[in-house]
Image: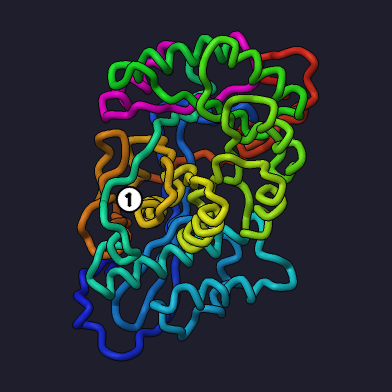
Amino acid sequence: MLFLFHQASTIKGDMKITGYRTVRTSHDWGRPVGDANGFIGSGVTELTVVILETDAGIEGIGMGMAHDLDRLFPALEGRDPRSVTALYDAMLARVFKSGHGGATFGGIAAFDSALWDIKAKAAGEPLWRLLGAADRFVPGYASGLDIALDDTQLAAFYDTMAARGFTSGKLKGGRDLVTDLRRLDVLEGALAVNTPRPALMLDVNESWNLKQAVRYISAIEEKRDLTWIEEPLRRWDAAGHARLSAAVRAAVATGENLTGLEQYTPLLDAHAVDIVQAGAVWGITHFLRLATVAHSHALPVSPVGLTANYAVAAAAAAVPNHLSAEIQDLGAPLGVVLDQEIADGGVVLGDEPGAGIRLDEAAIDAARSSDDWQTPAGPHVRSARAGLRLVSDDAWEA
């Protein structure tokens, strides 16, 4: 049994975590997806879903990188899943010597999201309400992972998103200035049906060095207003991000690949980030804690890639400084059923107890076909010449 509705009154006394299992499924985006580092031409990617089991019959569904689960699970086994924040810290402590960064943080996130799902199901409430949100609506922006799309495909994607009420969009680029300016025009034209001045963002996925970034963004800003520039430099370059933020009008957004609050400290201390981002793949507790830290610096927070962990939308609804969430697709992975709607330029969360995620394992078992983001030509493998090009080039190099 994968999913049960429970009211709070049905849970008496302790509940214990008894085990977990994983299900591998795929997401067919219906278009090539990628960024300045590469793309997946098939538009089909793989996803692992973690299911956390309890002796009360309630199961929690979590998404993340599903890495190091066997090493992390002893921190959870036999514990009450409703003690979510304590268990989150127990997982961090479990990998103390080797560290929790990188893909291990994704495993923590998958379990963490499953724990929050169980907690909300046990309380008989949707997760957004359990976390204290007053409004089920989460503002968002359209983001097509669109670097491999031609202009016609680009316009079609953002026309579709504009029909759902979006007034802002993010272009993947950074390889060729003329190309990006033309494609920003396409983006603006599609979104202009909803507002005379759409918010336009550019994401270059750490593909520049500092002076490349200053020159490139300054050239764009001669032509148009750029709301933010995302991941212009390597994620740890606090001094570079601070210099860049001072040199351009656009806000500097970064943080989606930082795995732990401690990795944000140099950026925040250097006043190097204007939009604090969190990868949705890193889970709910990380997002909540980061939002608090950002709020203490009077900075907005923005989750990146809700398709990697849909439950983070509930956390976004519950924090006071949420700006906008990245909405990459209107569909869902194979066999994943979501209690939410994409409308009015954001996500409208539903009323099902828990995170609003259900699985159809039979549908998943019936279709097994996917590519991995880690393929050498894919966006999760950094281009060898990133930050080292003298001349802009929108061709794909080996």
Q: Which residues are magenta?
A: 151-178
Q: Going by the image, does 164 lie left or right of 276? A: left
Instruction: Tell me if residue 59 comes above or below residue 247 in the rendering.
Output: below
Q: Quadrant of the N terminus?
A: bottom left
Most foreground residue, 150 or 235? 235
Across and down, in percent, residue 206 comes to: 67, 34
Front position in the image: 272 or 48 = 272
Q: Residue at x 30, y 66 (%)?
A: 130
Secondary-structure class at tag 1: strand
Quarter of the image with the C terminus in it: top right
Q: Is residue 277 left or right of residue 315?
A: right
The image position of residue 319, as x and y in percent, is 40, 55
Q: Nearer the viewer, residue 139 or 180?
A: 139
State left or right for residue 77 relative to residue 311. Answer: right
Is 320 above or below relative to 389? below
- Residue at the image position 40 percent from the left and 37 percent from the top: 327
Residue 42 visible in the picture: no
Tell which of 261 and 156 is nearer to you: 261
Q: Is residue 174 magenta?
A: yes
* Residue 76 position within the rendered picture, expressed as x and y whole percent measured from the top left: 50, 78
Query: 10 Å neighbourhood of mark 1: few (<14), some, or many (≥20)?
Result: some
Res 315 quadrant in image: bottom left
Residue 341 visible in the displayed image: yes
Residue drawn 48% across the image and 28% down it: 170
Magenta segment includes 160 = yes
Task: Name above or below for residue 315 compared with residue 138.
Answer: below
Dividing the picture into quadrants, the one containing residue 377 is top right
Q: Which residue is mark 1?
A: 336
The type of residue carrying mark 1 is: Val
Residue at the spot 61% in from the left edge and 28% down from the top edge: 204
Residue 99 rendering spot, x and y as whole percentages? 70, 66
